Amino acid sequence: MRVVVDFDLCESNAVCMVVAPEVFEVRDDDFLYVLDETPDEALRPKVEEAVRRCPKQAIAIAED
């Protein structure tokens, strides 16, 4: 699994960070950072929830 973020859509509202802080971080500069583009499969439920809860639908999962 690979985390893909459309940064043109992303508003850095940090919903994903609340759901999966191991993978997403919004820093003091108000930009979203993907901490782990290929997280462990054990984090899939959290990443899937972050995808569902993203208000701008800016996050996706790509299967490699």
Image: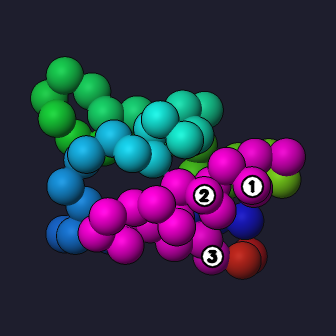
Residue 7 visible from this viewpoint: no
Kind of residue sitting beneath label 3: Ala
The residue pinned by badge 1 equals 45
Q: Answer with left or right where residue 43 lies relative to residue 56.
A: right
Residue 43 painted magenta: yes
> Earlier along the polypeptide chain: callout 3 or callout 2?
2
Q: Quadrant of the C terminus?
A: bottom right
The residue pinned by badge 2 equals 49
In the foreground, 22 or 54 = 54
Callout 1–callout 2 Cβ contact below 8 Å: yes
Q: Answer with left or right where residue 59 lies relative to residue 12.
A: right
How far apart marks 3 and 2 lie (CA) works out to 15 Å
The residue pinned by badge 3 equals 62
Q: Quick check: 57 above or below 16?
A: below
Residue 45 painted magenta: yes
Residue at the far bottom: name it. Answer: 63
Residue 2 visible from this viewpoint: yes
Q: Residue at x 25, y 45 (%)?
A: 13
Q: Answer with left or right where residue 33 lies relative to residue 45.
A: left
State the image coordinates of residue 61 (x, y, percent, origin top left): 60, 71
**Callout in the foreground (3, 2):** 2
Kind of residue sitting beneath label 1: Pro
